[in-house]
Amino acid sequence: MYNYNTVSEAVQGLSARGFTESFSLENDHLSSAALNLRLHPDHFEVIETHRFEGDTDPADEAVVYAIASKNGLKGVMVNAYGPYADSISAELIKKLS
């Protein structure tokens, strides 16, 4: 298991390991604007999760996900948690848990 100290270190480390695409969290899917792609929960797997907690600022709380799609595409998604978390579907919450 890889351990990273910061969000940027995690993103850089995962990118160096082949997780090169950038995914965004939508209501019921992940998306890649660069590829015009939508990944619904049954189309990807979470390979790694790295959680970061801000020592003094809740805005620093984030989760970095290493994602692999069923067709071999690998990328990273960064998402806030706690009071800054996005609203998403129950199916997507289950997949990312």
Image: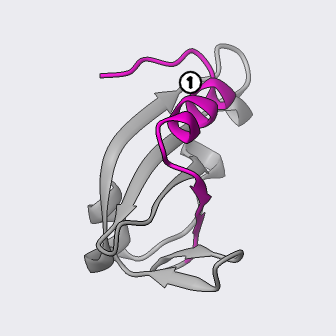
As drawn, 12 above or below 28: above
Amino acid marked by disc 1: Glu
Residue sitting nearer the eye, 51 or 77: 77
Mark 1 surroundings: few (<14), some (14-19) or many (≥20) residues within 10 A? some
* Residue drawn at the location 38% of the way across and 39% of the way down: 49
Judge whether residue 58 is colored magenta.
no
Task: From the image, tell me which residue sits under label 1.
Answer: 53
Q: Out of 5 and 93, give the one closest to the viewer.
A: 5
Q: x, y percentage for residue 85?
A: 58, 54
Question: Quick check: 16 above or below 89?
Answer: above
x%, y% of residue 47?
30, 47
For residue 54, above or below residue 74: above
Picture colour scheme: one colour
Q: In which quarter of the image is residue 5?
A: top right
Q: Residue at x 64, y 14 (%)?
A: 55
Out of 56 and 38, give the one closest to the viewer.
Answer: 38
The region drawn magenta spans: 1-26
* Number of numbered discs visible in the structure rendering: 1
Q: Position of residue 4 (x, y in %)?
A: 51, 19
Provide residue 94's location: percent of width, then percent of height: 27, 63
Q: Does the magenta stretch include residue 19?
A: yes
Seen from the viewer's position, the closer of residues 40 and 51 is 40
Establish if 32 lies above or below 52. below
Quadrant containing the N terminus is: top left
Determine the secondary structure under disc 1.
loop
